[in-house]
Amino acid sequence: MSDPFPSPAIRAEPPYLVGLNPEQRLAVLADDGPLLVLAGAGTGKTRVLTTRLAHLLVTRRVRPSEVLAVTFTNKAAREMIERVERLVGYSCEGMWLGTFHAIGVRLLRRHAELVGLRPDFTILDTDDQLRLCRQVVQAAELDERRFAPRVLLALIERWKDRGWRPEEVPPAEVPDFALGRAVELYKAYQERLLALNACDFGDLLLHGLSILGRHSDLLESYASRFRAILVDEYQDTNVAQYLWLRLLAQKHRNITCVGDDDQSIYSWRGAEVGNILRFEQDFPGARVIRLERNYRSTGHILAAASGLIAKNRARHAKRLWTEGEMGEPVRIAGLWDDAEEARFIGEEIEAWQRAGGSLREVAVLVRAGFQTRAFEERFIQMGLPYRVVGGPRFYERQEVRDAIAYLRLIHQPDDDLAFERIVNLPRRGIGESTLRALRTAARASGQSLFRVAQAMVTTDEWPARIRNALAQFLADVGRWRGMSSERDPRALLETVLEESGYVDMWRSDRSADAPGRLENLKELVQAVAEFDTVGAFLDHISLVMDNASDPAVDMVAIMTLHGAKGLEFDNVFLAGWEEGLFPSQRAIDEGGEKALEEERRLAYVGMTRARRRLTITFAANRRIYQQWSSSVPSRFLDEMPAEHVQHLHRNPATRPDFDPLFDDAPFAPRVARFRSRRAELGKVLEGKAELLVTRPTPGSRHFRVGDRVFHERFGYGRIEAIDGNKLEIAFDRVGHKKVVDSFVQPA
């Protein structure tokens, strides 16, 4: 290993200081002691953190082995060590640099016996954790359908994030889950982990806290060793991580934390924004340096984002600025509905591309995952390449593929892949051995699995239980196939999902992602409703799935706002800025003012992803899981400084088929109408806004043939036939459509 302290004298102006602005330089050169660097979006925080670490090493204030540097991803850790070694010119071997969990493993391997483990302990993945939770629930003689193991695991993870061992969970934090026995199950789970010589990710920090908290000699040793502690993304730390850092920093108090409270958006996974807000109380005499000069975005974007986030109360005051150009104002576009929103954004992207812009520099950011489908569908129709970042595309989601497999088998009974996917989903007692027998018989006879199954259920080769279950499944598929010629695809899919028990399977699942899966199924039902036949829908799906996500291809990125943190694009579209959707009414109902402030931080993060152009859209009407809602614009639009935004409206002469609502008048009167509607629909109480949407009530109106009516999506038309609550209407613009009466009103 080369000498960590080269002999040549350090120059008065080391090369690594060249190019730093005054605030960055202050942070890098700050004296020892607690230091909080409040680094706004795009202000160069990574450069500051790595340069400060290099400066500490070059000036011989610490040796590599005396440094503890914490990042939130392994990628960030690799990049940091590479940058530091380039700056200092020698190997930094011996430095404790990595994620919290990586450093936790390193500590725990050394002292595993102090918490009842051997040094060769195993770290369980999520599947193993769930399996262990299931064993614990079963051992307690509890019904796992009622008390889902996944819910127990979520509770345990939350408690570990808070730094609580089983005996430390406060009574007020114990839910009714498992008849009030959740802590007992947590204790049993921990005992099983020890018996297996295993731990989960939460234990990597929890055991570390136990070791340091119960063994003062070890705490003294490590606290003395780490003469410099540096932490990235401090706003994303949870309570256990915070306690761990505070223990290790108590001796030298030489801790540098870099973060931005305005970008704290992960409370749902344990992050505690209060950690960064109370830094000065935790470390009296701490120095605070603000990085406010932004190197990413134009002046208008920064001013609009800064004006919005200033509405939050729980934050350190800061305001981003740039020496660059002001650029375009933030553009705000109001559209008739979500379909028109997707069309508008698609056309804007095409115009960007025609002007020479790159698709990989374009992003569409949404608040909720269900919003991506409208854009996926529209972009496919346009032939616009896209990729969904941070998760599967809509039609690649497990529950969506399961439901589509039912339709595939109904449409084509010889589809063996669809048969195998759903024959035991939900569970019908048809196991792998039965499937193996079916495959063998199918190969021998040259027939499909479905045809072979029809024959084998009439024999005595299997126990009656299996024959009956398989016979019932085959009969159901046959009955649904008969319905397919009588019912529209939407009604058919709804029937199949209910009668098969597939929806009930997810309704009874208590896991955190089960509600989202049910919502995706509702969204799929809505997608199917746009097609006349099941075959047409399946053909469409084939085209969707053929839209390969080759990373080398120039593509638009579609992702949620949470998934966009840390990224940046030249041209950003923020879609769906309506009350109830963004800010999320569910979040506000559950978290009140604190949740509203996190929603505002999420808006700020989305805005500051844009470098050159930022467009925000909202829709007057949006279909959310089969339900049309009449929406009002997000309060966040009102909170941006008017001088930095531009409200768009289009000339109907250039788009004769465009609904005229947003073209007949300037934007201001439209906003006034929306605000008036908001005042009528709900009121703001103690910072919590009620859900400001209207929902039609089925059967609430009575019509006659010949009546002139108005539909929010299709416009004006005349009723030509009535069948119960279904109306056949000849619309002026789109021709004949069948709609439910609750979605129209007298003209």
Image: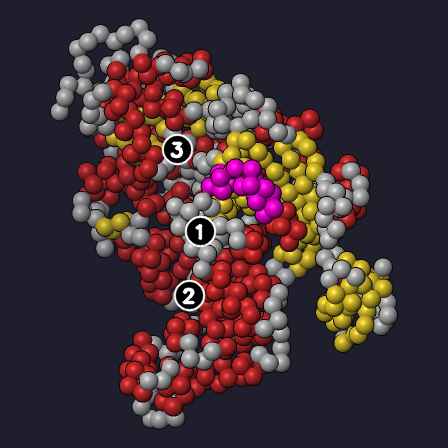
Residue 391's disc is 1
Secondary structure of residue under mark 1: loop
Mark 1 closeness class: few <14, some 14–19, many ≥20 residues within 10 Å: some
> Is residue 490 visible to us here?
yes
Tag 3 residue = 242
User: What span is in magenta?
Assistant: 346-362
Q: Which of marks 1 and 2 is in front?
A: 1
**Quarter of the figure with the N terminus:** top left
**Residue beneath the point at 40% across and 50% down:** 550
**Residue beneath the point at 73% across and 53% down:** 657
| Magenta run includes residue 353 | yes
**Residue beneath the point at 31% across and 80% down:** 439
Task: Name the residue nearer the viewer: 347 or 590.
Answer: 347
Q: Alpha-carbon distance for marks 3 and 1?
A: 29 Å
**Residue beneath the point at 29% across and 52% down:** 124
Secondary structure of residue under mark 2: loop
Task: Name the residue nearer the viewer: 211 or 126.
Answer: 126
